[in-house]
Structures are given as C-alpha cells and as structure tokens.
Image (spheres, rainbow, N blue to C red):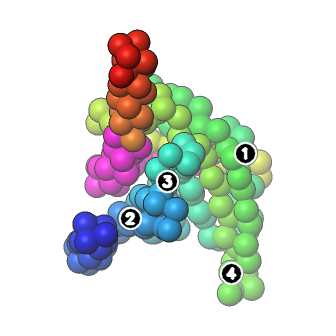
Amino acid sequence: MKKIAGILVSTFLLLPLSADASIITKVNPSSAATYVSQVTNTGPWNSVEVRYTNGKTLPTLTLTKTDSRDYLFADKAQLVTDEVASDLKLIATYRNPTGYRTQTSSLGRYEITQEQIASLQNAKNVSLQVSFRNSSTITWKVSEKVLNEWKEVLSKEQSQVSLQNTSLGMNNHAAHHGG
C-alpha cells in the first residue's frame, strides 16, 4: 500500500513539470491499476488519452475534438508507426454539448492491438490519420514527448503480458514435472 501511495504522490509531484501531458496511475479496490496518459490542446485535438487497466482489456486511445460543429468519427482510422500503417478499431463514439451553446465535444475511442503496442515501443515517428463521416481526414503527428508517455503506459501492458506468459509457462512446467 505504501508503494502505491508513493507512486501516486510521485505522479502528482511531477504533474507541474509537464504543461501538455501527464501520466496518472489509479488503483481501485479490485486491485487493478489503471494507467493513463492524457494530453490537452495538442494539434487538432482538445484531448488525447491512452488508457490501460491491468488485465481488463486492451489499451484504448481516446480523441476529443470540441468545435462549433459535430465531428462524426468514422470507422476508418490508422496508426502510422515509422511509415507502416495499421488500422485502429473504433469501439465507441460520443457527442456531448459543452457549457457553451455553440460548442460540442466529439469523442472517438479506439482499441490498440498487441501488434500496435509492439510497433509503438520501438517507433521513432508516429502519426494518426482519423476519418470523419462529415469532415475531411485529420492527420496528426504525435510529438516525441507524447509518444514517450504512450510508451510508458503501454509498457505497463507489455509487462503484464510478460508476467502472465511467465506464470503460464511455469504452471505448464510444473504440470509436466510433477510440481
């Protein structure tokens, strides 16, 4: 428990050092930790979030655009890592009116696959190509700082997969050798 509290305190102390991005770790009673990198007002997006909850689901990428018109996220979006494109799976879209009558927040949430996680871990250049049903495609080059945060969050996912594979391998080993 002290270790978790130390991580949370360290995270909050480091927040002021990063004006446009932050990594947050949340721990809930079910002992699943959630890792989040959230960036505000970067490129065309009002918010960009990468989120991973240990052992629950694949990591997600959430893009939010607030404007005077609705942006209807289309199924077609691509993650381009070092000039190699892969499709992102759209898993949810939302539209919320803001406190201003003339503004609407449009949100698209995408799933990040194991293959995409692996390609991001070694990537030097990353961009997103996001299509809309009612607007032209947006291409956004991810900054190095944001990419490094994504790598940190996604490394939490990779370490969980490694731990699961290791424990499975040990269980299989024990079953074959009477352990």
Tag 2's secondary structure? strand
Magenta residues, start to end: 137-159
The residue most toward the top is 176
**Frontmost residue, 161 versus 71:** 161
Q: Of marks 2 and 3, which one's residue comes earlier in the chain? A: 2
Q: Which mark is residue 25?
A: 2
| Quadrant hosting residue 15 | bottom left
**Residue bearing mark 1:** 74
**Residue bearing mark 4:** 98
Residue at the image point whose x is 54% and y is 29% from the top: 86
Residue at the image point whose x is 73% and y is 62% from the top: 94
Q: Dot 1 surroundings within 10 Å: few (below 14), some, or many (20 or more)?
A: some
Q: Dot 2 surroundings within 10 Å: few (below 14), some, or many (20 or more)?
A: some
The amino acid at mark 1 is: Ala
Q: Position of residue 85 (x, y in %)?
A: 50, 28
Q: Of marks 2 and 1, which one's residue comes earlier in the chain? A: 2
Q: Of marks 1 and 3, which one's residue comes earlier in the chain? A: 3
Image: 13 above or below 146: below
| Quadrant hosting residue 66 | bottom right
Q: In 3D space, how far apart are the residues under numbered discs 2 and 4 (Cα atoms)? A: 27 Å
Residue at the image point whose x is 46% and y is 60% from the top: 31
Q: In 3D space, how far apart are the residues under numbered discs 2 and 1 (Cα atoms)? A: 30 Å
- Left or right of 129, for residue 108: right
- Left or right of 123, for residue 10: left
- Left or right of 140, for residue 101: right
Q: Are marks 1 and 3 in contact (CB under 8 Å)?
A: no
